[in-house]
Image (cartoon, rainbow, N blue to C red):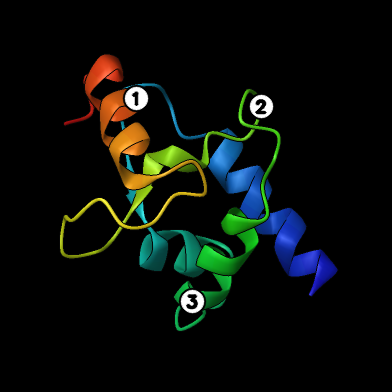
Amino acid sequence: MFIYSEKVLQIIRKIPRGKVLSYKEVARLAGSPNAYRAVGNILNSNRDFKNIPCHRVIRSDGKIGGYNRGEKMKRKILKSEGAI
């Protein structure tokens, strides 16, 4: 799981400001297309918000999805970045 976590975090670090990826897209890019729930679990434990912009990962249906600092905060950050 550690190796997979590192792959996921590397992908998240590369998402540019104003862009988003879905949990499913991140899982596919990390090499495990069906592991989108694992991606969510990995991001839920993120505490390095400055270097790992986990708020830039949303649900594949376009909804915001969860965020460990609250969905309201996630929406606010994404709006400030021009992603939504």
Nearer to us in this view, 54 or 68: 68
Amino acid bearing label 1: Ile
Label 3 belongs to which residue?
Answer: 37
Considering only vertical position in the picture, is 4 above or below 11?
below
Q: Earlier in the sequence, mark 3 or mark 1?
A: 3
Q: Identify the residue shown where x is 40% and y is 44%.
A: 70
Residue 51 coordinates in the image, percent (x, y): 66, 27
Amino acid bearing label 3: Arg
Q: Give the quarter of the figure containing the N terminus.
A: bottom right
- Residue mark closest to the camera, 1 vs 2: 1
In the picture, the disc for residue 40 is: none
Nearer to us in this view, 6 or 44: 44
Task: Please identify the quarter of the rendering in which residue 74 is found.
Answer: top left
Residue 13 coordinates in the image, percent (x, y): 60, 35
Nearer to us in this view, 64 or 3: 64
Amino acid bearing label 2: Asn
Which residue occupies the extreme bottom position in the image?
A: 34
Q: Identify the residue shown where x is 70% and y is 33%.
A: 48
Q: Earlier in the sequence, mark 3 or mark 2?
A: 3
Q: CA distance from mark 3 to mark 2?
A: 22 Å
Q: Give the quarter of the figure containing the C terminus.
A: top left
Residue 38 coordinates in the image, percent (x, y): 57, 74
Q: Identify the residue shown where x is 31% and y is 57%.
A: 65
Q: Identify the residue shown where x is 28% and y is 61%.
A: 59
Q: SS of the residue at dot 2?
A: loop
Which residue occupies the extreme right position in the image?
A: 2
Q: SS of the residue at dot 3?
A: helix
Q: CA distance from mark 1 to mark 2?
A: 15 Å
Label 2 belongs to which residue?
Answer: 51
Label 1 belongs to which residue?
Answer: 77
